[in-house]
Image (cartoon, rainbow, N blue to C red):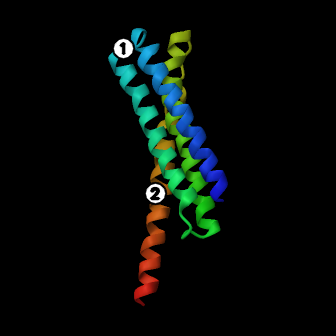
Amino acid sequence: MNNPARIAALILGLLAIILGAFGAHALQKVLTPAALSSFETGVRYQFYMAFFLLYLGLEHQFSAKRSRIIFWLTLSGTILFSGSIYLLVLLPLAGLSFKMFGLLTPIGGTLLIAAWLVALMHFFSKQKSEVG
């Protein structure tokens, strides 16, 4: 599971750099400050999750099963969270509305929280087994 996590981390990081530059240069002229702030939130969280996946890919203490769970929670959560923010901000520029899918953002956020909780639970369970 290490390579898929590292590859996904690098792809998410690369896309975050591209989207961040796009937001800073092209979107600044066409978006409201609130919409630009939302877009930047999507980019920022995408970066956070890229670093988290990189950590997951380099960490060897997680079982293969737990790594897969964390990987899929993180990847799907990032796509839903950041992706829905990008769509909510960009589609109105094309005259389209994405508001009916606005629930994807909190669902994605919930998946991201779950990924971090699964990782945290690993260390609590490991600590407990070392003590007991």
- Relative to residue 63, is residue 99 depicted above or below? above
> Which amino acid, by three-letter code, is at mark 1?
Thr
Kindly tell me whether residue 99 is visible in this rendering: no
- Relative to residue 84, is residue 116 depicted above or below? below
| The C terminus sits in image quarter | bottom left
Give how far across and how far down residue 29 sits, in percent.
40, 9
| Secondary structure under the numbered disc 1 in the rendered image | loop
| Secondary structure under the numbered disc 2 in the rendered image | helix
Q: Residue at label 2? A: 116
Q: In this view of the protein, which residue sits in the foreground, 104 or 132?
A: 132
User: Who's the residue at 55% across and 59% down the image?
Assistant: 58
Q: Residue at label 1? A: 32
User: Who's the residue at 49% across and 24% down the image?
Assistant: 88
User: Who's the residue at 39% across and 20% down the image?
Assistant: 35
Q: In this view of the protein, which residue sits in the foreground, 10 or 130?
A: 10
The answer to which quarter of the image holds residue 23 is top left
User: Who's the residue at 48% across and 29% down the image?
Assistant: 85
Kindly tell me whether residue 2 is visible in this rendering: yes
